[in-house]
Image (cartoon, rainbow, N blue to C red):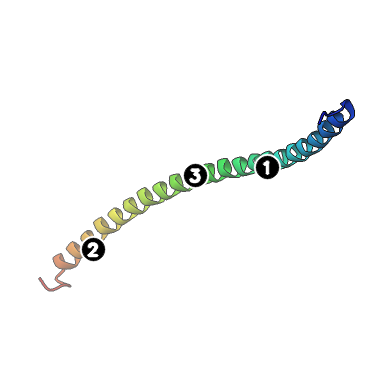
Amino acid sequence: MTLTKDDLQAISHLFDDKFESIDKRFESINGRLDIMELKIDRNARNLEKLQFEVKAFKISTQKSIHILQDEMETVIEILKQNEMLPQ
């Protein structure tokens, strides 16, 4: 059995149609992957920003607590000196 030129062209067109369909699917997948990469990059930047803000909040809170502790020690000492607190 020998394939004629027309048979080979018909087979070629069938393959072309299949490959075109596959190419369209890959283009769609690539587009979605591009969107996912952009979202991942955005989320990574947001995470870095959040980590920085949490670190800044931690430092600020530690400073505030230290100041409050110092002030409380001062208040306690003044109350003791004025005999307003039992020793």
Reply above or below: 62 against 28. Answer: below
Which of the 4 image quarters holds residue 24? top right
Mark 1 sits on what residue?
29
Reply above or below: 74 against 16. Answer: below
Residue 34 is left or right of residue 67, and the answer is right
Mark 2 sits on what residue?
75
Residue 54's x, y, as percent?
42, 50
Mark 3–mark 1 distance (CA, rounded to whole Å): 30 Å
- Dot 3 and dot 1 residues touching (CB under 8 Å): no
Earlier-in-chain disc, 2 versus 1: 1
Marks 2, 1: nearer the viewer: 1
| Closer-to-camera residue (8/19) | 8
Marks 3, 2: nearer the viewer: 3
| Closer-to-camera residue (76/46) | 46
Marks 3, 1: nearer the viewer: 1
The kind of secondary structure element at disc 2 is helix
Label at residue 49: 3
Give the residue at x 15% y 67%: 80
Hey, what amino acid is under mark 3?
Answer: Lys
Q: Residue lying farthest top?
A: 5
Mark 3–mark 2 distance (CA, rounded to whole Å): 39 Å
Give the residue at x 67% y 44%: 32
Residue 73's x, y, as percent?
21, 60
Q: Residues within 10 Å of mark 1 (few under 14, many from 20)?
A: few
The kind of secondary structure element at disc 1 is helix
